[in-house]
Amino acid sequence: MNRRAFDDVAQSMMRQHASKEGVTVFLMDIDGFKPINDSYSHEAGDAVLRAIATRLKLIAGRDGLVARLGGDEFAILRTSIASVQAAVQFGGKIAKVISQPVLF
């Protein structure tokens, strides 16, 4: 999903879940991504982006939505985050999952 589709779905989800549990948005970008393209090739960079996207989809689960906003930026929308503490814990899971090495 790209930025435009993400924005449309995010707005729809926020309207749909406004009176319920709400929607939590996680935004992230990959630090140090540019040197991957520069040093190893755009093919390697694309492999990293695909691996990260796959990992984020797995962690987002059935009630989550993952989008690549552009470059090395991703977002996850979740509707089942009940508290700030739960959001922080989920953010920690995201960090752990995307910090794992990508083999190319």
Image (cartoon, rainbow, N blue to C red):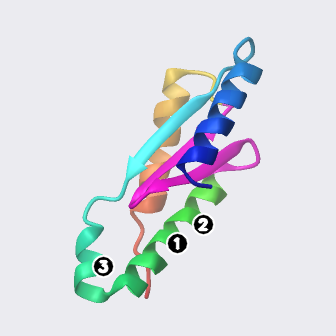
Q: Is residue 72 magenta?
A: yes
Q: Is residue 62 magenta?
A: yes
Q: Please name the amino acid that badge 2 sits on.
A: Thr
User: Callout 3 environment at 10 Å: few (<14), some (14 to 19), or many (20+)?
Assistant: some
Seen from the viewer's position, the closer of residues 64 and 69 is: 69
Q: Nearer the viewer, mark 3 or mark 2?
A: 3
User: For the residues marked 1 and 2, what is the alpha-carbon distance in whole angstroms?
Assistant: 5 Å
Q: Please name the amino acid that badge 3 sits on.
A: Asn
Q: Earlier in the sequence, mark 1 or mark 3?
A: 3
User: For the residues marked 3 and 2, what is the alpha-carbon distance in whole angstroms?
Assistant: 19 Å
Seen from the viewer's position, the closer of residues 67 and 90 is: 67
> What secondary structure is the magenta-colored segment mainly?
strand
The secondary structure type at the circle numbered 3 is helix
Tell me the residue that label 3 is attached to.
37
Q: Quadrant of residue 103?
A: bottom left
**Residue displayed at 63% across by 46% down:** 5
